[in-house]
Amino acid sequence: MRSSTQRFVVGVGLVLVAVGILFLTRPLQIGRSARTETSGSASDPVQQGSESSQSEQSATAGSSHAPEPSQPAAIVSNQGAGPSVPNSRAITNLPPASTPNVVAPPVPESEITALESDLEHVGMMVRQFRDALGENPIGTNAEIMKAVLGDNLKQAKIGAPEGQNLNGEGELVDRFGHPYFFHQVSKNQMEIRSAGPDGVMWTGDDRQIK
């Protein structure tokens, strides 16, 4: 009877020891499993990031090799356009318009000599004015002739040279109908020029006196 009681006590003790060991080891296993889950969840974002970057690279590569859509060709319409411009090549190929060369007939030498004599008389008119008023007349051709004809301080009337006339603007003209050119060089010196037969000033047929 005593031996069976002892065996019962020993059996109960062993059961209690086993239960105690079980309760002691259980928290350790729970902590290990928790650490394992934490490390696994921490590595997931890295893997997800690498997967997302790989997918973006593949998408970019696909878009770079994608063919560009072809643009429709521009349609040029002639509606509403102005009148057509003639071909410049056709214009340049036209023959140049012929311009007849007009050659003035030669002026007799006697006319040139007479012109030089007329200039001497005009110079004499200016000298007479200077002697009467103490200085040369000034201004344009018409202003000088106005003074010579009496519109001056002394109202002295010198008059135009004999045989020479004034035009409608009151200018003294040469035998070819061209106005004389008066240039006041100084108070006591006057340059008088005729354009000559061609009527163009500063050419070879001009005549002048001072």
Image (cartoon, grey):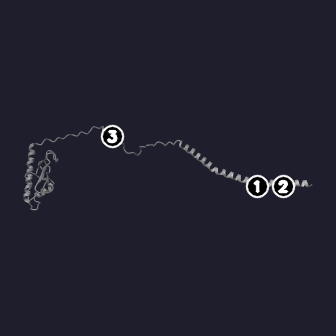
Of pointers 3 and 2, the one earlier in the residue sequence? 2
Indicate which disc, 1 or 3, sits on the residue closer to the N terminus: 1
What residue lies at 87% left-to-right and 54% top-to-bottom? Answer: 8
Residue under the image location 75 percent in, 54 percent down: 26
**Residue found at the far right of this picture:** 1
Residue under the image location 57 percent in, 45 percent down: 57
Distance between the alpha carbons at the discs numbered 3 and 2: 126 Å
Instruction: Tell me the kind of residue under disc 2.
Output: Gly
Residue tagged 3: 88
Horizontally, residue 94 falls left or right of residue 25, namely: left
Q: Amino acid at mark 1?
A: Leu
Identify the secondary structure beneath mark 3: helix
The residue pinned by badge 2 equals: 13
Q: Nearer the viewer, residue 201 or 111?
A: 201
Residue 7 horizontal side relative to residue 83, left or right = right
Where is residue 47 shown, x and y percent of the image? 62, 48
Whole-Å distance between the Cαs marked 1 and 3?
111 Å
* Upstream in sequence: badge 2 or badge 1: 2
Left or right placement of residue 209 versus residue 59 in this view: left
Q: Quadrant of residue 12?
A: bottom right
- Disc ID at residue 24: 1
